[in-house]
């Protein structure tokens, strides 16, 4: 039962400017579920109240359900109508009780929105508009209700019955059924409703809040996975303490439950008191999860927990305000993760992620501001822009206000808007009122799309004692926004002396607000080198006139770790862009900088591992006028080989040293850093072409006592052509054939492989018996990973484009949301040569013309064509 629409129909567009408050409020709702996978009956009792003086009927959203009966104030009525799938009820008074009964079919719900079945259990996902697939209701975030939920189910199949809030009663029924009742005292929008029924085991914990209340914690999974829940439970407790300490936010219910499910459209969901997670963000043990997985689990657990305040206690007025909760909550979870280990490495990872997914979005056909003006399908706006650029914008506010005023601002925001549905403007006004800092111009960040480009050139005349920094900003046009205004860019800047490496001008934060500005530095006694956008203080693209020597200097001396990393990356990037364009490239300077970094005993191994990695193929391509994937690949591989060969002895030494981590897997920042450096070193040893590289990787693969080492060895082997490659893939598959999350890795490693035959391999893997489009993780592991493999996806014969389009069309019939998310690589056609661009457009056009396309996919594909 898909929300089908033909591509010929005019899509319905929702506009921010057309917001009006709800006609009817629903302060109370009681739900009664008779659960069954094939046919679930839902009785809903809504206490509705008419809003300000109007005569309009009650309109309740609905989708994919069968309406059985309607009562008003206890009396069956039949004067209702359906406007499309919206139930319209004429009502005479100012307050009424509406009862509906509907039937839904969870096991046929392949979209995974609303109530659906996963692994024999039943669960819900309602954000953004899934609740209307459960019952008739005003499905919009500014209608807040108190929920009372009763459910009954077969006790043998569904022994555990969970919902939001606190459990209040339970009992037995005839025919092997049982029931439970839950009540959530906090009014909430329906997108935060959740229910889970199934056969689940629980790992329990407890947390005492800052005011001394004890909260019972539970992580619910299938019994066989219970030993893989300890890390998530620890992360939950750490998150709860962190939000008290850093934001003064205390948890507010007596229980907090998390359920892990295998079939899930995204990462996780912050339903009040009952978070539902994709199992990949809960389950971990050393044998099956990498360090990256451990980090991601802690980050997502924290993210969803933090939503209890930034999202639930204060929610969004409408979906245009999505970044109000998501940008802020990502900012909070990033700060949390930074506090758990190396803040510098965390910042590097976050900026790398932003550049990999958000910058291309901002530069492409789907660019939108963090507070969009219109949408066809809101699910398409759960983007890197709303989440990650949104987080950067909160980060700039924190920089501009400073720690104390920022905290005063968030306190005021939570205080003012607790229990309400707020707007981005409410948030900014709170920060403004608490700090006394005028944010008028800053507000442009909310409405303007596109990544600003900042040019910086530093002028110094020897002997003058003065230096002048000329800064200019410009944001390129994006679809629908031809002319851009100057933004407020907080740029952390410092000058170093080129000879002494001493500080010539101490760090300061410059607020660039005009299109062009000049800053004068006095007392500059030696040639200064510019360190700018330290800590990535503004999400901009910097173009400076620094020479390769300046970058190498900063790469060796800058005392801001992010700036140091950035200088090395820029040096590598300039070299690779030149090499890919057949221009003279000074690769020796890169090799020297890498050698110096690797040898610097004062540096944290985790930092070294990040700093010596070459920029990704896609990031290199982003710097070119026309992306040439083959040339980029060749240039990057050649430089990898040169770095590998020239420094082979150093890589081997680094490899051996980071081996010596003692026995047994430890998840600590230090141990993680060593494993990371070890895997980077292994990659370079293999890139050098050393004859023993495959044997070394295979030995690591076999000896590994953890997935981090095993997967990195497999990745290295899969890139080469050794006999060990096939052996390792087989061993890995057989060893983990019953673990879906690890099998996802097996698919991804192959789809991302830098091989000539990757396209053919992926085509074959699509027919593998373990492959299915019905599980989003599996679809993403193969199709999603292939789409970001620059060289394979952009094969010159167009086979990669065709493969992706065919899979997207097939997946759209099953799960439109998940399909629409994977289209971005095809939308980059303007960045390629005419032949590739033409083939990509042809595939987009084919998708748009597909009969019965979802509105999710129609919006993304048609916009990508423009
Ligand atoms: N609110 C959830 C989170 O950020 C994600 C919900 C995604 N919903 C969607 N329709 N894509 O944690
Ligand atoms: Zn979120």
Image (cartoon, rainbow, N blue to C red):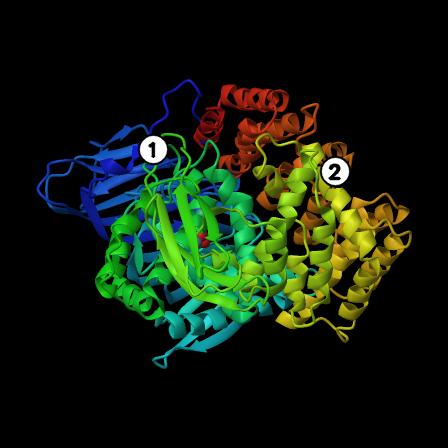
Image location (x, y in percent) of residue 408: 28, 68
Q: Which residue appears at 44% of the width and 74% of the height?
A: 241
Q: Which residue appears at 79% of the width and 61% of the height?
A: 651
751 or 183: nearer the viewer? 751
Q: Residues within 10 Å of mark 1 (few under 14, many from 20)?
A: few
Asked if 207 appears above or below 744 in the picture, the reply is: below
Q: Residues within 10 Å of mark 2 (few under 14, many from 20)?
A: some
Please give left or right for residue 669 compared with residue 441 in the image: right
Image location (x, y in percent) of residue 534: 49, 59
Q: Which residue appears at 33% of the width and 43% of the height?
A: 486
787 or 222: nearer the viewer? 787
Figure quadrant of residue 475: top left
Secondary element at image label 1: loop
Q: Which residue is mark 1?
A: 483
Figure quadrant of residue 836: top right
527 or 283: nearer the viewer? 527
Q: Residue at the front extreme?
A: 463
Please give left or right for residue 731 compared with residue 71 in the image: right
Gap in Å between the C-alphas at discs 1 and 2? 38 Å
Asked if 56 appears above or below 610 in the picture, the reply is: above
- The tag on residue 634 is 2
Q: Is residue 283 visible?
A: no
Image location (x, y in percent) of residue 166: 37, 66
* Chain-order first, disc 1 or disc 2: 1
- The tag on residue 680 is none
């Amino acid at each position: 039962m898909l929300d089908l629409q033909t591509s010929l129909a005019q899509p319905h567009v929702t506009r921010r400017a057309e917001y009006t408050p709800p006609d009817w409020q629903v302060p109370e709702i009681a739900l009664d579920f008779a659960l069954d996978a094939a046919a679930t009956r839902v009785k809903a009792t809504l206490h509705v109240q008419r809003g300000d003086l109007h005569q309009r009927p009650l309109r309740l959203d609905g989708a994919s359900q069968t309406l059985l009966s309607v009562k008003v104030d206890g009396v069956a009525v039949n004067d209702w109508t359906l406007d499309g799938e919206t139930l319209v009820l004429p009502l005479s008074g100012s307050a009424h009780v509406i009862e509906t009964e509907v039937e839904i079919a969870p096991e046929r719900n392949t979209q995974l929105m609303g109530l659906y079945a996963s692994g024999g259990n039943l669960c819900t996902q309602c954000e953004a508009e899934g609740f209307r697939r459960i019952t008739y209701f005003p499905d919009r975030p500014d209608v807040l209700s108190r929920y009372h939920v009763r459910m009954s189910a077969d006790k043998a199949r569904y022994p555990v019955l969970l919902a939001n809030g606190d459990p209040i009663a339970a009992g037995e029924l005839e025919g092997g059924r049982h029931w439970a009742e839950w009540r959530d005292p906090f009014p909430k929008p329906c997108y935060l409703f959740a229910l889970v029924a199934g056969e689940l085991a629980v790992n329990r914990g407890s947390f005492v809040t800052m005011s001394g209340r004890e909260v019972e914690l539970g992580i619910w999974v299938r019994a066989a996975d219970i030993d893989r829940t300890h890390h998530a439970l620890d992360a939950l407790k750490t998150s709860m303490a962190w939000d008290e300490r850093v934001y003064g936010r205390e948890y507010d219910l007596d229980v907090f439950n998390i359920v892990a499910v295998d079939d899930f459209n995204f990462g996780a969901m912050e339903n009040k008191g009952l978070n539902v997670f994709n199992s990949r963000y809960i389950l971990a043990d050393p044998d099956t999860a990498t360090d990256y997985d451990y980090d991601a689990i802690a980050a997502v657990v924290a993210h969803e927990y933090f939503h209890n305040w930034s999202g639930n206690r204060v929610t969004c007025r409408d979906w245009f305000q999505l970044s109000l909760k998501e940008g802020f909550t990502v900012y909070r979870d990033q700060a949390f993760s930074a506090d758990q280990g190396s803040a510098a490495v965390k910042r590097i990872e976050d900026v790398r992620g932003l550049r990999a997914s958000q910058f291309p979005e901002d530069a492409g056909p789907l660019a939108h501001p963090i507070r969009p003006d219109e949408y066809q399908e809101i699910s398409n706006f759960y983007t890197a822009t709303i989440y990650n650029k949104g987080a950067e914008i909160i980060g700039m506010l924190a920089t501009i206000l400073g720690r104390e005023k920022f905290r005063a601002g968030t306190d005021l925001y939570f205080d003012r808007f607790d229990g309400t549905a707020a707007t981005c403007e409410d948030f900014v006004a709170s920060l403004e009122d608490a700090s006394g800092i005028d944010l008028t111009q800053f507000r442009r960040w909310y409405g303007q799309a596109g990544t600003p480009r900042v040019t910086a050139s530093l002028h110094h005349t020897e002997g003058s004692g003065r230096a002048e920094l000329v800064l200019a900003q410009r944001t390129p046009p994006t679809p629908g926004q031809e002319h851009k205004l100057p933004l407020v860019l907080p740029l952390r800047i410092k000058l170093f002396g080129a000879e002494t490496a001493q500080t010539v001008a101490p760090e300061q934060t410059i607020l660039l607000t005009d299109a062009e500005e000049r800053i004068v530095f006095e007392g500059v006694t030696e040639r200064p080198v510019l360190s700018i956008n330290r800590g990535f203080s503004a999400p901009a693209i910097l173009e400076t006139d620094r020479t390769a020597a300046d970058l190498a200097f900063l790469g060796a001396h800058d005392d801001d770790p992010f700036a140091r990393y950035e200088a090395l990356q820029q040096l590598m990037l300039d070299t690779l862009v030149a090499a890919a364009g057949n221009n003279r490239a000074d690769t020796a300077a890169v090799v020297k900088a890498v050698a110096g970094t690797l040898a610097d005993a004062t540096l944290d191994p985790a930092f070294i591992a990040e700093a010596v990695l070459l920029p990704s193929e896609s990031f290199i391509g982003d710097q070119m006028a026309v992306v040439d994937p083959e040339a980029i690949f060749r240039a990057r591989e050649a430089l990898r080989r040169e770095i590998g060969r020239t420094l082979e002895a150093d890589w081997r030494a680094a490899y051996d040293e980071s081996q010596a981590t003692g026995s047994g897997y430890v998840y600590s920042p230090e141990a993680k850093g060593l494993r990371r450096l070890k895997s980077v070193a292994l990659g370079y040893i293999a890139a050098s072409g050393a004859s023993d590289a495959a044997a070394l990787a295979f030995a690591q693969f076999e000896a590994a006592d953890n997935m981090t080492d095993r997967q990195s060895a497999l990745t290295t082997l899969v890139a080469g052509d050794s006999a060990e490659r096939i052996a390792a893939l087989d061993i890995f598959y057989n060893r983990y054939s019953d673990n879906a999350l690890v099998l996802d890795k097996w698919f991804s490693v192959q789809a991302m492989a830098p091989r000539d035959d990757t396209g053919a391999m992926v085509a074959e893997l699509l027919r593998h018996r373990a492959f299915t489009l019905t599980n989003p993780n599996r679809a993403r592991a193969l199709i999603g990973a292939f789409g970001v493999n620059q060289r394979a996806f952009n094969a010159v014969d167009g086979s990669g484009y065709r493969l992706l389009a065919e899979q997207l069309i097939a997946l759209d019939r099953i799960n439109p949301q998940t399909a629409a998310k994977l289209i971005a690589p095809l939308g980059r056609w303007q960045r390629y040569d005419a032949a590739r661009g033409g083939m990509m457009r042809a595939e987009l056009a084919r998708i748009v013309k597909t009969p019965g396309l979802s509105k999710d996919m129609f919006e993304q594909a048609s916009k990508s064509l423009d």
